[in-house]
Amino acid sequence: MKRFFDLLAILLLLLLATSVFFLFSFHPDRYKSDFLHWFNQQSDWQLNYKNTQWSLKQPLSLQAFDLELAKSGQAAILAKQATLNFALMPLLQGNISLDSLSIDQAQIALTQQLFDAPAEPIATEQQSNNPVLAWLDSVELQQVIVKDSDFIWQDAEQPYRLERFELAIEDWQIDLNNPSPKQWQFTLHSSAQLLVTPWQEIAMPQLSLAYAQEQLVIDHIGADLLQGSVYASAELSNKQLRIREVALNSLRLEHFANQQFGTTDANSEPQEPLILPELDWLDSIQVDNLLLNQISLVSQVNGHNLVLNKFTAEVENFQSPWPFDQQAFEADYAFIADEFGIDHIQFNDLTASGRVAQGQFSLAALRSQLFKGQLSLSLSYVWKQQALTLHQLVLANNEIPIQPNWLPQAPTDSGEDSVQPSTELGAPLQQFNIEQLELQQVKLLSYADQFPFSATGLNVELRQLELIKDGKWQSVDDIWQARSQVFVEAPELAYRGMVLSHVSMDLGSDQQIGYFNLYGELPLGQFELQGQALLDQENKPWQAELSGLLLDVSPLARLANNRDFSLVGDLELAGKLRGKLSDFGANIDGSIDFHSQLLQLPGADLEVTLDQIIESPRQYFEDPNPLISSGWPVFWQNPRSLPQGITQFTNLALSAELEQGKLRIAPQPLPGLRYQLTLAGEVDLAKQRFNDLKLVVADQPCWRLVHSITGQWSQPAVSFDHYLSPRRYSVDQQDFVRAPSIPQCRYPLAGQVSQ
């Protein structure tokens, strides 16, 4: 028996010695070609390496050098060295325990196709109940380290490159009984030298996070970009994303775009709102603190230049459901900026604060230097109702240059129905109310050729005006309420060189009786309009008196914007008007009287001009002279083109009657010339058109020349009829047209040569 045990001991020693010899003498490179052939036959992935090394010390270690792993057209991984440390004993307990996996100097390239590949077939119930490694319970990876590596991601021909990055994953635990990523547990730390994107290079990107029990905690995410830095920390739990802090410091942004953001045509379909995707893992977002520090921006959008310098903003207590709903999010904000410019508008030392809650944006207090003066603004806007309320706007001591692009362009299409009341025009908002607007000692100067205007020392005060309601601009009667107030005062106003002084306009009410007053002075004259309105009655009836006296009308010549045109004389104006504020233009009644003892137009002689046209029609009518080709405006637009001299009217007395918005001029003479000039016709103020307004030139007992105007104000049909011509000359068409049937005049043409 003793010999038997001795023999058994010898056999065990021999077996142990053989095993130890085999383990220490075995090297996997001996079977490299067989292993690679077997592996590469199993899948689309191709594996290769130069050589490997074993270490049987605790823990076990396997090293591979010049490792290559690739999938054609989808992925490629090259690593200088990969080291795996693992333990065998946990396998006896059904656990895979990997102490560490280290990869050095790797080059990793992935494409979107790798993740677009069709998914593996779903295992049958029998297969899932009998897994190949059913005896394994979990996988633990203590540490994964990637050092001094590069990564490239190719997505839709737009590459992303991560240079010299390092990655550390620690305490990675996977329960094989429930291997869903939601049940994973790990911590991750990563940094890189440079992240290159199609739009921007980002230096020193960093990320540190932990994930366990379906809770993600981002301790730190940051980077250096745009000459500044970005930092954030957040956590995600129970489908709620809480961003504890976001900080953007000293960024320098440049953006130039040609897209027409937010531009809509009045007749176009409204733009579809931006719809954010729903995410299964996200229900709401909360931001405790968002800080923008010393941000600068240079941009060009829709043809407008934007400049923002040293902008600092803070947003707190931001809360919103996901997808984002502008009706449900809340936030408090405040910001300051050294400079904010839009084209020629520049705000300096800008400060503001406010709140967004329950679909309403509130700007509580905005202060800034603007156009050498001060700006104060507070407002609120309700998204759903598209309602803007201007609580307070104060401009003080500003010098505002009015640019040409600030003013609306003149309409190009002027058909019969092109002019509509303002109430018919669509508005950019559904509601717009002004509670208080003030201008204090403001100077205006227009650089627009279509509106050369200036004002000095302008004071304006507006109170309680509703300008837009239900998406339409309000009419006069809707705007003027008992609580409304308008006051305008300017020591000096100038238009095309004509200077008005002591100009004032006052509109208000005393209980339910409204009053308005307009007053101004010229160097040798003044004008005034005074009136009242009954605001509590239907349609708001009103009445007014108009008066004006100019002992010198020469300043009015400046309105022609022509140095060759001048006026000499006097003018007295008086009128009584009444009507209803509802449908204002179509409800004006009353009368207006004009009187002038002397009115001269130095520069052009109308009598000589008429002599030429009437006595020599072939030379001056059939071959139109400037008066016929241009109409009466030639007197103030180009008087030098006519025979030089003086045109003089004496003892002018004109009167016109207003009825339902139509100014009717009964035939009235314009005395002072050898010819008899008679003015008659109608002007429709509501529809803004001329209704057969005529100036007839007669030489007793027969008419000689008729000037007719009819049609819209913007493009009227202007024509001349000569008593000896069967054709009518159309000024707007610059050609002759067939004249209407005109009775022949028996009075012979003076100086006519018989044929």
Image: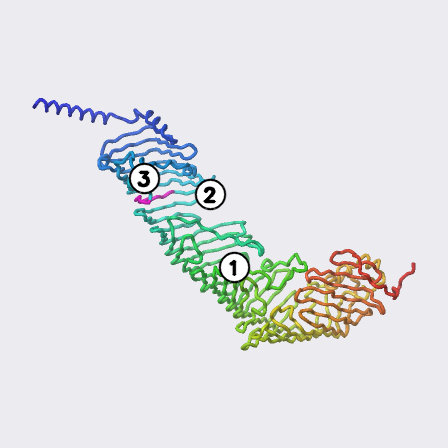
Residue 198, disc: 2
Q: Which residues lie in the magenta part?
A: 182-192
Please state which amino acid type lies under the numbered disc 1. Gln
Rate crowding at label 1 as few (under 14), some (14 to 19) or many (20 or more) other CA atoms within 10 Å: some
Magenta: predominant secondary structure element?
Answer: strand
Screen quadrant of the C terminus: bottom right
Q: Earlier in the sequence, mark 3 or mark 1?
A: 3
Q: Which residue is mark 3?
A: 145
**Could you tell me how far apart the alpha carbons at marks 2 and 3 are, in whole angstroms?**
28 Å
Q: Residues within 10 Å of mark 2 (few under 14, many from 20)?
A: few
* Residue 184 covered by magenta stretch: yes
Report the coloring of the rendering: rainbow
Q: Mark 2: which amino acid?
A: Pro
Residue 346, label in figure: 1
Task: Locate residue 683: give its quadrant.
Answer: bottom right
Left or right: 247 with respect to 515? left
Q: Is residue 691 magenta?
A: no
> Tag 1, which secondary structure?
strand
